[in-house]
Image (cartoon, rainbow, N blue to C red):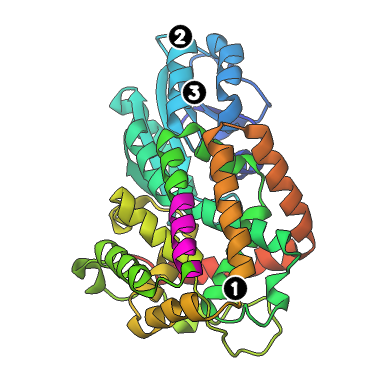
Amino acid sequence: MEDVAVGIIGMGDMGRMYARRFSQAGWRYDTAEFNFGAGAAGTLQLNSQCVEAEIIGKVVAEYGPSTKVGAIVGGQTSCKAPELAAFEKYLPSDVEIVSCHSLHGPAVDPTGQPLVVIQHRASQESVDLCVRILSCLKSKMVFLSGEKHDRITADTQAVTHAAFLSMGTAWAANQQFPWEIDRYVGGIENVKINITLRIYANKWHVYAGLAILNPAAKEQIRQYAQSVTELYKLMLGGHRDELTKRIKTAGAAVFSSDATDQDLLLGDEVLDKFSLSRLPKERTPNNHLSLLAIVDCWWKLGIVPYDHMICSTPLFRIWLGVTEYLFRHETLLDEVINTAIEDHSFRSDDLEFTFAARAWSDCVSFGAFEAYRNRFESIQQYFAPRFPDAVKLGNEMIKEIMTKTKK
């Protein structure tokens, strides 16, 4: 093992996961909460910051100037623009910058998951050292610029998170536990419920930083809220022809012939397997406004989701999988459109979902971290009793789905 001291700043869930992996691999590390200068004299050192994007500037301003000469500094935030700007402003010029971002949560096995490595201000020798240290995670390394990273994370995470956050908000507003309602039975519903609960079982800042600090994410969340609103108005007005044309035009743009030539990311055998519900398995037709709106949003913004599969999160791959499943089954898609016009079973749910999508978009547009936190934690409290079961089932679902989405 090379004589390298690895410093970890911020011992949250991801910081602890990194520390555990480094220790198991035999690397010498310091887990002091804020310790830039740890390590024996004469060693080349890596300092990794595992703190929230919202406070990265404050942390680097206070501790950056004391960074050891010749050290390599990086961060784990989900939005790189403010992180790299803070490094450039406060770190001494002789400190090299190699940042990274594990595109998964702390409860997910990092093996095979994307790990972005960003050579921002560093020699190839320093990058190679970082790669050797990070290799203990057994992740799939993807090399990008900070700007490219932020664009891709916006494309693959911002709207995905907004959709699930809005679903949870709507269910809580209607005082519903969807796994106890016979309208929410079936494979697609399993994904909606499991992933929504999984997101709310995490910490609020995991999602707030990416949404609020990434300009591209703001634009996408705003468009998602607009797509939800416009599609819901077409449903309310009974505008079948206009709704059908819009949905199928969006589907044709996102799921092009190149995409449809490939096998489905997900199939019935996986979608139906993981359920929190103890209700009968008979499926109730749903208009799936959340899924229709995400494809409409991608179409409006010119996003091709398959372009970013190499560095996508497990949640994005699952969300893309169920969306693709819907849009590539023409009979099911026609059923969804008919349900949207003829069946009012989900109208109250969709009303709250529309309110929620717009409210989350406002939080993000206004840069309101505290409002984001308050909204998130109030809904988190509502669903908290079911988190242990949901997280366990979600882990199993993600593990199986990941083996079926290796594209």
Residue that mark 2 sits on: 92
Residue that mark 1 sits on: 346
Q: Going from the N terminus, do you reach mark 2 or mark 1 first?
A: 2
The local secondary structure at tag 3 comes to loop
Q: Is residue 74 visible?
A: yes
- State which quadrant residue 254 falls in: bottom left
Q: Going from the N terminus, do you reach mark 1 or mark 3 first?
A: 3
The stretch of residues the image draws in magenta is 224-236
Q: Which of marks 1 and 3 is in front?
A: 1
CA gap, disc 1 and disc 3: 56 Å
The circle drawn on residue 45 is 3
The vertical placement of 273 against 156, above or below, is: below
The amino acid on which the numbered mark 3 sits, given as a three-letter code, is Gln
Question: How would you classify the magenta stretch by its main secondary structure?
Answer: helix
Q: How crowded is mark 3: few (under 14 residues within 10 Å), some or many (20 or more)?
A: many
CA gap, disc 3 and disc 2: 15 Å
CA gap, disc 2 and disc 1: 57 Å
Question: In the rendered structure, does residue 229 fall within the stretch colored magenta?
Answer: yes
Q: Going from the N terminus, do you reach mark 3 or mark 2 first?
A: 3
The vertical placement of 316 against 26, above or below, is: below
Q: In terms of depth relative to the viewer, which is nearer, 110 or 24?
A: 110
